[in-house]
Amino acid sequence: MNEVFEFLKYKMTIEDITSGITAAKVTGTINPPVESTIKEIKEYFLTTQYTPILSEEKNKHVVQFGIFKKVEDKPKYWLHILLFLATILTTIFAGYLNFGSIQSGVLFSFSIMAILTCHDFGHYFVSRREGMITTLPYFIPMPGHFIGTFGAIIRMKSLIPSRKALLQVGMAGPLAGFLVALPITIIGIALSEVKMVPEGAGYLRMGDSLLFLLLAKIIHPNIPQGADIFLHPMAFAGWLGFLVTSMNLMPVGQLDGGHVAYSVLLKKRRYLYIPIFAGLVALGFLWMGWFVWMLLLFFVARRDPVIQDSLTPLSRRDMVYALLPLVVLILTFIPQPFILG
């Protein structure tokens, strides 16, 4: 460990050292030009047994390093396949319950599973490209649920190498899912029927996002008074895809939007939380589900991603890319998802 300290004293002005048996923390100021020096520090650590974490605390540069146990990636393919097949069955059953036929159930399942699969494999392939150890998606079947699934999750088992990597991994999933949900929604709305709403009969109507409303008006421009669009199973899956995408893009905690926001703002991301939670409280009076979502976000908001190098800033191009998830959030957000008509 002493040889590391000897190296660092030529690369930064050291103000404090905290040292243990297998890990140490060096605080000070990295010599300019900072980005070039950071590159040299990272290259040096590749020749050692230590893994570095570069960050900033109270306007001081911090280099932490230690010996971390390497996590082996041994996927249980049988489990991933079993959960995937089980989720296909539960989504087919959900579609059957919602629309009354096995054919509708299959169309719904195909559509929602395509969106979810592309979302999670978007995360998976980009994280692998960045050299991260990431599991295959674990799909979550929900028998008897009106959607049939709680989506899917992947687990990252290694450090996130940089702010750029966090940005790209965070945005890859929702953008991939959105690009699949968009044509599914267009086809589904085109296949949906415009029918007269029975007088005096209460029914559950789906709220509109800006994009869904625009697509519906383009595809069905002349809806007569007292009529509505009765969604085809593919349109319903696309609508759900938009809803899940927008909820996942909120810039909070471990959500995809939270990762994107953290890559851009780092710890300043917390300044977004008060307006976000205030907005959810207001929206809760339109749909009670926002109160539940707000409580869930409260718990996930407490954790920040661990980035191996949070000192190297995003490029101007990366900052432009970071606007794409915000645009998708605005287009797909549904203020009142369910309306009793």
Image (spheres, rainbow, N blue to C red):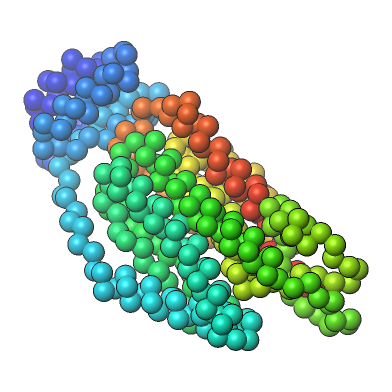
Is 16 placed left or right of 224 in the picture? left
Look at the picture and state if 176 lies above or below 150.
above
* Residue 305 appearing in the image: yes
Residue ID at (41%, 27%): 313
Is 57 placed left or right of 328 in the picture? left
Q: Nearer the viewer, residue 16 or 64?
A: 64
Task: Report x, y in % for residue 237.
Answer: 59, 68
* Residue 19 appearing in the image: no
Task: Report x, y in % for residue 9.
Answer: 18, 17
Residue ID at (55%, 85%): 102
User: The N terminus lies in which quarter of the figure?
Assistant: top left
Q: Nearer the viewer, residue 98 or 272?
A: 98
Residue ID at (48%, 25%): 316
Look at the picture and state if 122 lies above or below 265.
below
Residue ID at (55%, 44%): 325
Report which quarter residue 85 is drawn in. bottom left
Task: Report x, y in % for residue 153.
Answer: 40, 62
